Image (cartoon, rainbow, N blue to C red):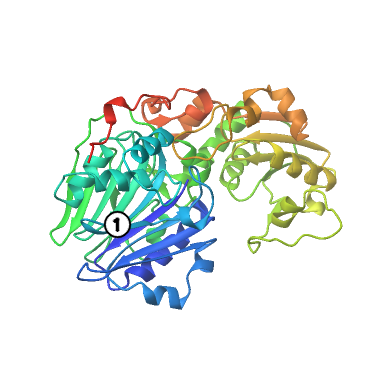
Amino acid sequence: MCGIFGIFDHDEAANLTYLGLSSLQHRGQEATGIACINNDGTKMEVVKRGGLVAEGFGKEEIRRLKGKKAVGHVRYSTTGASIVRNAQPLYVNYRHGDLALVHNGNLLQSAKWRTTLEDKGAIFQSVSDTEILIHLMSRSDAKTLKDRVVDALSRVRGAYSLLFLGETGMVAARDPWGYRPLVIGKIDNSWVFSSETCAFSLINAQFVRSVEPGEVVLVNENGLQSFFPFKEHKNKAKCIFEHVYFARPDTNMFGHSVYKTRVRSGRILAREHSCEADLVIPVPDSGIAAAIGYAEKSKIPFAMGLIRSHYVGRTFIEPSQSIRSFGVKLKLSPVKDLLEGKRVVVVDDSLVRGTTSRKIMDMIREAGAKEIHLRIACPPVTHSCFYGIDTPTREELLASSKNNREIANFVHADTLGYLSKAGLLDSMGDKNPESIYCTACFDGNYPQSPSADLATNMPPSV
């Protein structure tokens, strides 16, 4: 899962991209980068760094990024190791000039694509699946940037929201299934693109609309133009996990307030898995809204029984004396005076491997809680995601091999309750939500098979 941002025709393109990426920092903390092209389109400057946006960009880096057009990226690796050479934007100077590309999602069968292209002479500079698109564009005979993008995307499958910055403009694209979000905004006469609407608030951009599934948007000196070059699917596959966990609560995602959907999920969770308790406490921060909904429906008081430190960055220093659950304790601290002797409902957004949840339950127990009733605001995660979320192999997913009682024992909770899939879909507030959202991580019903053959999508020989 990553965050992308772009702006076209603004005097402070690099500055605003920096701010936009800062608002999207929750979508990726491993690396960040910005590409900016000068006003006559003859020179592109790219700065990429490991770590957070504020760590990677200071006044000197921003000063290097001159021009009125820019794209940026925050990375959370799914395909390709977490090293700076895999950071984005990916940049090349090819026969059509400078090109920078940022991507949120995952291309299916990327290993086969890489082998196919290498057999035809391609030389890769990273192990990111995104670089496949650059090689396909470089081999395309299409005459324009937009048509080269369409040519490349017509050959691949998977999940993508993309921004391309080239010599003649900027192109935004979203896959026909609509897995990953991408929205359009405007600042005066400047067009802005972002993974989430929350980035618009900081820079005073007005939300215009979403890039539609299967849409390709071209922005150049003639303004904004929209194209639908791909075969439309009757059903869509918008990632419902965006609402569960990834999106910021103040974002409007797929036409819905993330905060409101999470509160509704908590209310439904309380209806499906009620219990007698003294307090409802969230695992901050992503569990807060659902916990508020659970408390409202159950009439059990809400309290911040866990306090999160927002000032803990990456740390390589640990005490010489071993401290159990040191990493979790750096980020979360229980309020002992609140928890001691209490029966508590702990609400979290999801449970994947279960190791962190177990450490949190132990902390709450050590703080004096008498009973712990863990409630999860989504269904059990039983299948891996191939569309842009870095979920473990199925063997590592706790719910793929254990029942609720076994999972409760593993995480040291007295009881465990998951929101049902029907309850999660109901929380979205859509008519016929099963035809709109991808729920493959909960039920294994993959909209696109990860193992489909590449034979019909071979790139042209050159």
Amino acid at pointer 1: Gly
> Whole-percent x and y of residue 10?
27, 69
Query: What's the residue at 84%, 53% (across, down)?
Result: 322
> Whole-percent x and y of residue 118?
37, 40
| Local SS, label 1 | strand
Along the line of sight, the residue nearer the viewer: 62 or 460: 460
Query: What's the residue at 46%, 35% (across, down)?
Result: 240
Q: Which quarter of the rendered picture does the C terminus lie within?
A: top left
Q: Is residue 274 visible?
A: no
Along the line of sight, the residue nearer the viewer: 403 or 453: 453
> In the displayed structure, would residue 462 be above or below residue 397?
below
> In the displayed structure, would residue 168 be above or below residue 417?
below
Query: What's the residue at 56%, 35% (across, down)?
Result: 267
> In the displayed structure, would residue 190 be above or below residue 183?
below
Q: Is residue 439 left or right of residue 305?
A: left
Quarter assignment of residue 51: bottom right
Q: Is residue 155 visible?
A: yes
The residue carrying mark 1 is 185
Along the line of sight, the residue nearer the viewer: 398 or 347: 398
Query: What's the residue at 60%, 51% (across, down)?
Result: 285
